[in-house]
Image (cartoon, rainbow, N blue to C red):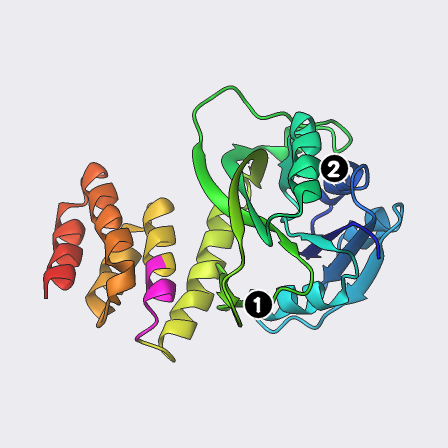
Amino acid sequence: MSYISAVIICKNEQLTIGRYLRSVSRYTDEIIIVDTGSTDKTLEIANEFDVKIHHYEWNDDFSAARNFALSQATSKWLLILDVDELIEDEDILLLYKVLESNKYDAIDFQLSQFQVDYSNIDPKAELQLPNVPALVKQKMAVIRNGVQIRYEGCVHETIVHQQRSPQGLNSDIRCGHYRDSATVVSRALYYSQLESESLTKDKTNSNAHFNYIYNLVLNKMRQEAAIAIGQLEFIDEHYKSRFKDLVLKMHTFGWLNESSALKRKLEG
């Protein structure tokens, strides 16, 4: 069995796929690409590398595509990054050190988010984490193959443990998420549309509701956020702390009516 499989889903990622593959090909043994319908040069670039390409008919469900991708990997460890996410070079040795300890089933990275204007960057140039403040969050980026983990949710996927919860590590491994500034708004609108359609089918899914409202707030879509808060009917106890943080975030934006409305939902 090989050691590390990089597993990605992609569509029309010609600006980022080459840089991603140059990075992961240096420290992984297998690269699984699940393409959901690229019409640009994504596959042409990918075929310049030693990769295994699978085609998946897109059905507006990121979790379904990601679960299919995971099922194709054969290595002991599965690296689950998006094509615009890169591990810092100096942290690759740290990744190997953690894996070789063999103590954990799942490993979180420290993900720093930045917006990048790819139109002004040579696709073959390397990217480095800018020395500026960034939104940092944890991301489960490596799992042991065979651990019963699946993704659920059509967008902003949630990890579900089908059997026991895996033994996890919140590591210090750093990863940069270099979002394309030209597509941030259009992607946010598309994701919001998928989430909105999903929520009409399941009004009690607090995780999906939180992700939906959170991303509306993050992308300053105030009117849409107000509507989503008004439609919120149920908040599971396990998610109330996250919604409370969201109340504070909206308050800092000056969204007083919206933050008050969400606070009333929490207290009701």
Question: Does residue 237 sit above or below 218 in this rendering?
Answer: below
| One can see residue 223 in this view | no
Quadrant in the picture for the C terminus: bottom left
Residue range corresponding to the magenta coloring? 204-210
Q: Which residue position is annotated with label 1?
A: 150
Amino acid, disc 1: Arg
Q: Dot 1: few (<14), some (14–19), or many (≥20) neighbours within 10 Å?
A: some
Magenta stretch: includes residue 208: yes
Instruction: Determine which quarter of the picture holds residue 253.
Output: top left
- Name the magenta segment's main secondary structure: helix
Residue beneath the point at 65% across and 30% down: 91
In this rendering, the count of numbered labels is 2
From the top left corner, tell me how far across and down residue 188 is, in percent.
Answer: 46, 53
Q: Is residue 48 left or right of residue 165?
A: right
From the top left corner, tell me how far across and down residue 190 is, in percent.
Answer: 49, 60
Residue beneath the point at 56% across and 39% down: 177
Q: Which mark is residue 233?
A: none
Q: Residue furthest top?
A: 131
**Which one is in front, 243 or 180?**
243
Marks 1/2: CA distance?
27 Å
Q: Which residue position is annotated with label 2?
A: 19
